Amino acid sequence: MRKAEIHRDTRETRITLSINLDGQGNVTAQTGVGFFDHMLDLLGRHSLIDLDVQAKGDLHVDQHHTVEDVGIVLGQALERAIGDKKGIYRYGWASLTMDESLANVALDLSGRPAFVFNVPFKGPLIGDFAVELVEEFFKAVATTAKMNLHINVPYGSNNHHIAEAIFKGFARALRQAVSIDERARDIVPSTKGSLTV
């Protein structure tokens, strides 16, 4: 089973996160940050990855540590659950709309972290959620999962819609990348023969 559970305990956050790559999109997200919980729910449901996130962070300071550290732990869990990457598609991409907004997301589970984020948010907040935390979250995921992740939003006028398009687009791209290719079930999709170093 392609599952993983990670615990992270620091002076800023305490996080327990579990995933099942071959799930049905069942999500429990309790981070203390309402909008972020909503985005994590979208991520799980549209990737069909079961996701359970329990996080307690220093929200009296701000939401930054909680959101970034959940990204760190999610990336670690993804890397562990994927394992040696034998049989996966490796690449995933999605061009996804949310009303007036469009997000283009492409990723490669290459074993090498790289991150590109071109997103023109309209103002600094979604409710009380700082839009800059969307970038921080995905940068943390890409770094610890050791993936190439490119997120580009060519247009959009509503911050909530932009963020939702990004999370759904990432979910669909991730679903494709971690899926098993029946024609290459026993093959690591790399000319090097390895995607773990």
Image (cartoon, rainbow, N blue to C red):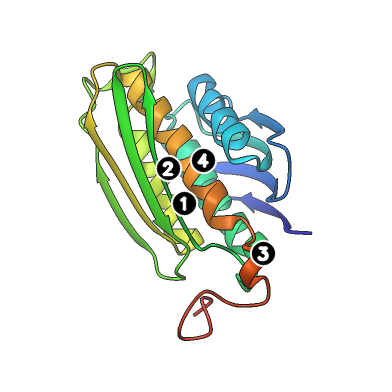
- Residue beneath disc 2: 137
What is the secondary structure assignment of the residue under circle 1?
helix
What is the secondary structure assignment of the residue under circle 4?
helix
Q: Residue at x 63, y 50 (%)?
A: 9
- Residue beneath disc 1: 141
- Closer to viewer: mark 1 or mark 4: 4
Residue furthest to the front in view is 183
Q: Residue at x 69, y 48 (%)?
A: 19
What is the secondary structure assignment of the residue under circle 3?
helix
- Closer to viewer: mark 2 or mark 3: 3
- Residue beneath disc 4: 171
Distance from Cα at disc 4 to Cα at disc 2: 14 Å
Distance from Cα at disc 1 to Cα at disc 4: 12 Å
Write down the quadrant of residue 77 in the picture: bottom right
Identify residue type, mark 3.
Glu
Height in image: 160 above or below 149?
above
Name the one closer to the observer, 69 or 156: 156
